[in-house]
Image: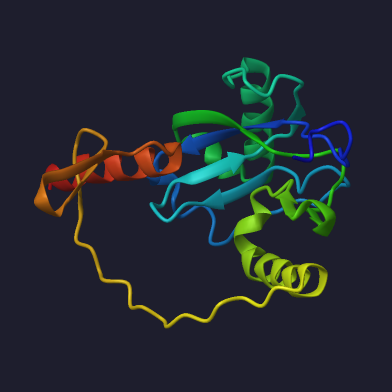
Amino acid sequence: MEYRKSVRSFLIKPRKGQYLIFNKTAKDVISSSILPVPTEITKGIIVFKSVYDNVIIGPTAEETEDRHASPTIDSAITTRLWNHGKKTVPSLSKHDIVHMYTGVRPATENKDYQIIARPDRNWLTVGGIRSTGLSGCIGIADHVLSQVKDKFGIEPSKSSWETIQKVNFNFTKNGTVMFPHGIEHLITHPLTFTGVTRQTISQSNL
């Protein structure tokens, strides 16, 4: 809707980010995430640890015009990330990189989220939400709720809370996760895939 020329108020300008993932032998080199001073464009390259104990360096922030091209690994950026990691945590140089990946996030020309109410079109846009949308989701939801009530005059329906049942699952050596009744799903996120496949392999060798 926001991309129709008659109502366009922002543009999606994809921003590519690349990461390096280290072997779990590096898990003790940091005890917390290390963040640089953020800029107007990006929060910078972070050294952090995943829930699977892999130390990760990234992301970078490269502007790209093609929203549909498959993101590829850039060797020059890999070198830049590796140098940043060694400078930030020198002991990382003793550990191996086991995986690297890149992805595209939906940045806009503005640094803020694009939450735009258009009552005349019965439309509300929630766009330009990047990784910080996870930590900011409660605030975003509260703001959207206020927009729906104030701009559209709509009161949300009330529903009862439902308890989410615990689901048993197991990771496999093949990079999949098995659920009850033989339901199997492929693990697609690189951090999860790297973490659980190596975790499964190491546990099977005990």
Quarter-of-image position of residue 147: bottom right
Q: Residue at x 44, y 30 (%)?
A: 99
Give the residue drawn at x 62%, y 46%: 89
The picture places residue 16, in percent across and down from the top left corner, at 68, 30
Whether residue 116 is visible, yes or no, is yes
How is colour applied across the structure in the image? rainbow
Q: Nearer the viewer, residue 105 or 36?
A: 105
Question: Is 116 on the left-hand or right-hand side of 190?
Answer: right
Q: Quadrant of the N terminus?
A: top right
Question: Which residue does the image show at 70% across and 73% down from the upper left?
Answer: 154
Q: Is residue 117 left or right of residue 28?
A: right
Residue 34 in view of the camera: no
**Residue closest to the eye, 43 or 176:** 176
In the rendering, at what x and y percent does residue 87 appear? 69, 39
Residue 133's place in the image compared with 202, above or below, is below
**Residue 175 drawn above or below residue 48:** above
Q: Is residue 21 left or right of residue 89?
A: left
Between 71 and 142, the one lying in front of the other is: 142
Q: Looking at the image, which residue is at 40% across and 39% down?
A: 23
Residue 178 placed where, x, y %?
A: 18, 47
The percent position of residue 150, horizontal first and vertical second, equals: 81, 74
Please count the marks in the image. 0
